[in-house]
Image: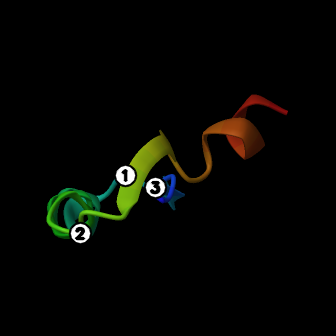
Amino acid sequence: MSQRPLGFGIWGTGMIAEFHARALAEIWSVKLVASIRAGQSAACR
């Protein structure tokens, strides 16, 4: 039986986000499904 990948999202797209995305890509059971710039929605209010 194959398992579905566990979806992850990254909150904040600063310098470290690319490192985290690359690390998640190395894990076979994980899928990056979303990323969002921190503060973007707060700045629009």
Query: Which mark sits nearer the N-terminus, 1 or 3?
Result: 3
Q: Earlier in the sequence, mark 2 or mark 3?
A: 3
- The residue mark sitting in front, 1 or 3, is 3
Q: Please name the residue shown 27% across and 65% down the image.
A: 24
Q: Can you identify the residue that label 1 sits on?
A: 13
Residue 6 rendering spot, x and y as whole percentages: 51, 61
- Callout 1: SS: loop
Q: Are marks 1 and 3 in contact (CB under 8 Å)?
A: no
Q: Amino acid at mark 2?
A: Ile
**Label 1: how many residues lie within 10 Å, few (<14), some (14-19) or many (20+)?**
some
**Pointer 3: what residue?**
5
Tell me residue 32's x, y (percent).
40, 49
Question: For the residue marked with disc 3, what is the amino acid?
Answer: Pro
Front: mark 1 or 2: 2
Display colour scheme? rainbow
In percent of width and height, residue 14 lies at: 31, 58
**Mark 2 lies on residue:** 27
Judge whether 35 appears above or below 26 on screen: above
Q: Quadrant of residue 28?
A: bottom left
Say which amino acid is labelled 1.
Answer: Thr
The answer to which image quadrant residue 16 occupies is bottom left
- Quarter of the picture holding the C terminus: top right
Q: Which is nearer the eye, 17 or 34? A: 34
| Most foreground residue, 40 or 30 | 30
16 with respect to 45 (left or right): left
| Label 3 crowd (10 A; few <14 / some 14-19 / many >=20) | few
Q: Is mark 2 in CB contact (under 8 Å) with mark 3?
A: no
Residue most extreme to the front: 1
